[in-house]
Amino acid sequence: MTDIKLVYFAWVRERVGVAEEIIDVPENILTVAALAAWLSQRDEGYASAFENPKLVRAAIDRVHAKPQDVIAGAREIAFFPPMTGG
Amino acid sequence: MTTRITICIQAEVFDAGKETEALTSPREDVGAVATFIGYCRSEGGRLKALELEHYPGMAEDEIKRVVDEACTRWPLSSVSVIHRYGVMKPGDGIVFVGTASTHRAQAFAACEFLMDYLKTRAPFWKKEYRADGTVGDWVEAKADDDAAAARWALKS
């Protein structure tokens, strides 16, 4: 198990129910997509946040990441909807 | 060319006149300044406000990466990006992008590139507050914005 800080924004944060948390991620969870799938099984809130994986973006240590990116060594992983700034 | 870069993520209102002035002084190599200001709008009276949420730390980092990319493409004397967070009312400025260069083509292109990239890469999200007092939805990303950013893609 590895402690990783997870942070959530916008409607992902609202659905998950917390802005950030430290989670023990099992060693067999290797990628961003696998982490999202694993989180979605935690409870209804997570399931709702990740129900359409295409609508959830991620960042590893504050750099945009792709679903297939490996999470090993990450300190902070963020999940959020497509950005709407500007 | 060493580009003078200013990046601010702030709740406070910005003064576009002062920011524009700051792009040129005291540089005497600047022949052109292009600026863009994005505003909160009411959508025909439907909205009372927008709330902008951001990812502190990553917002600054990502905007810096986009500015650095612009600096590799165009010779820029100065670049300034200010992006606000918090509650905005219709008419409030949300984002300011200013570019200064020797000639106008570079200033225009860099300014447009920066906005197109910020829309799709800077971690900000807008939530709507309706004029009738209810909380609205999160604004959805537009496919047009992705297309606008994609047209700047590096040719391989």
Image: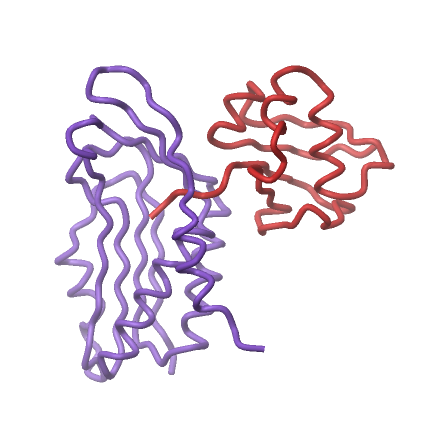
- Give the image location of residue B92, x and y in percent: 18, 40
* Residue drawn 60% across the image and 40% down it: A54
Q: Is residue A59 left or right of residue B62?
A: right
> How many numbered marks appear?
0
Q: Residue furthest left?
A: B17
Residue B59: x and y, percent?
45, 48
Looking at the rendering, which quadrant does residue B140 occupy?
top left
x, y percent for residue B141:
42, 42
Q: Horizontally, is A65 left or right of B79 in the view?
A: right
Identify which residue, B42 or B85, lies in the foreground.
B42
Q: Is residue B114 above or below residue B32?
A: above
Considering every residue shown, the one lying at the far right of the view is A28
B49 versus B83 height, above or below: above
Q: How is the image coloured?
A: by chain
Q: Quadrant of the N terminus of chain B?
A: bottom left
Residue at x 20%, y 27% (from the top left corner): B46
Q: Which chain is purple?
A: B
Horizontal and vertical percent for residue B23?
22, 68
- Which chain identifier belongs to the red chain? A
Q: Residue at x 28, y 15 (%)?
A: B134
Please, is residue B56 above or below residue A25 in the view?
Answer: below
Using the rendered view, name the quadrant where residue A44 is placed: top right
Quadrant occupied by the C terminus of chain B: bottom right
Residue at 36 percent across and 74 percent down: it is B3
Q: Is residue B142 left or right of residue B51?
A: right
* Nearer to me, B130 or B85: B130
Pick the residue in front: B11 or B146: B146
